[in-house]
Amino acid sequence: MTQKTLAVEKASLSPGHSAQSSPTKKREKAAQIRKSFQRPKFWVMGFGWCLAACAGAANVIAFKSWNLYASHVTGSTSAMAFRLEGYHQGEFGSESFREAFFLVFSFLVGAYTCGLLIDKNQVHFGGKSSYGLALLMNSTLLVLAAFIPGRLLPACFVATACGLQNAMCTSHFGAIVRTTHVTGTVTDIGSTLGRISMIYLRKGCRRSRLDDIERAEVGVDARKLAVLFGLWSFYFVGGLIGVYMENVIPGPPTRALLLPAFFTGSLGLFYVACRQLLKDYIKKLEKDRFEADLKEAQEAIAHMGSRLHSLETGNDESLVVELDEEMGHMIEALHEVEADFDNFYRQHSRVLERSDSSVSKEGTAV
């Protein structure tokens, strides 16, 4: 073992080295926390919020038209339990049990259909996922429900449309996203607010006392709240619009379902028509973001180099603190570049795998 190696090990075991490595580890952990949830693009959030408004309108219209909630699988399941309990009391209502069962089953069929069309339960536009077809099917189901006579059958069509839409928007960027009911959304809003409040209460409600990890946790939870509260708000607004349109549109109340059907159908047609343009646009956004993160990392490294040069020529102790801060910023920037590079590599790996498989198939056919 050389003297240089012994000196490095002794330095690593010294108290000063551990004190300096602790802030670095905290910054690395904070960077990982921030990387765990990336704020969706505004147009992606708008897409989910508008679908939530459509679901809110459809659910309200279904209740006013047939006295049945189309998207309340929890309520329908509880209704089945009530009817079975009434059976033991000699008050079994087979009609009510049948309605609740078929509403749950229809919602399940819609989610199952989404699983056939979209291979992943995460929002990722492009690839083999048939978002356009799913939206068009959703619109078709709502149109059928608006014109088919009866009570249970059209309500089941609306429930199927809700199941299809809800499964299509299951998760995005680490946040659970539900667009057809808000029980889980309100639960997530409450728990997220509780976590933020506890962090501030531990620090005397003063943001200046928060360390890097706590700031990262608060920032991530705040971005999640923006998505979740938007979903709840648009679902509520959609319900108000559904009630209003039911009173305005002439004809039976079910005709108001044509409004959410028109919106989802328009989104589906737009996606089908502009699918390739949308894929190219998303790739350009990812490329621009990668270049911006890389440029930020390069600037951080260059700035740190100038600080090191100043530290070598002077004895200002404040430069040590500034250098430590710059190191933390540089680590965060490098983590972002690493995440963008991983995403870019995975996408191109999938493209190469598909091209290799097609080439092998052609060679076999020859």
Image (cartoon, grey):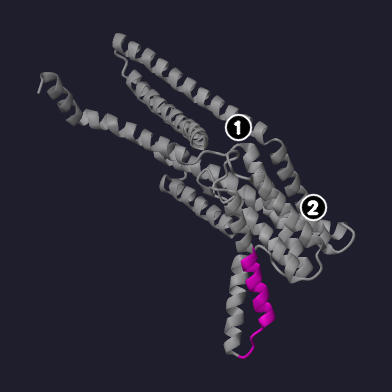
Query: Residue 364, percent across and down?
Result: 49, 37
Question: Most extreme residue toward the bottom, as rendered?
Answer: 90
Q: What is the C-alpha distance between the residues marked 2 and 1?
A: 29 Å
Q: Is residue 172 left or right of residue 50?
A: left
Does label 2 or label 1 sit earlier along the sequence?
Answer: 2
Q: Is the C-beta separation of discs 2 and 1 under 8 Å?
A: no
Q: Secondary structure at mark 2?
A: helix
Q: Which residue appears at 15% of the width and 27% of the height?
A: 10
User: Can see residue 237?
Assistant: no
Name above or below for residue 216 compared with residue 109. Answer: above
Give the residue drawn at x 76%, y 69%: 66
How many other residues sit within 10 Å of disc 2, few (<14), some (14-19) or many (≥20)?
many
Q: Which mark is residue 259?
A: 2
Identify which residue, 116 or 304, lies in the foreground: 116
| Residue 282 - label | 1
User: In the rendered image, is residue 278 in sight?
Assistant: yes
Q: Position of residue 352 (x, y in %)?
A: 49, 32
Give the dominant element type of the magenta stretch: helix, strand or loop: helix
Which is more toward the observer, 252 or 195?
252
Q: Residue furthest front?
A: 366
Magenta region:
90-106
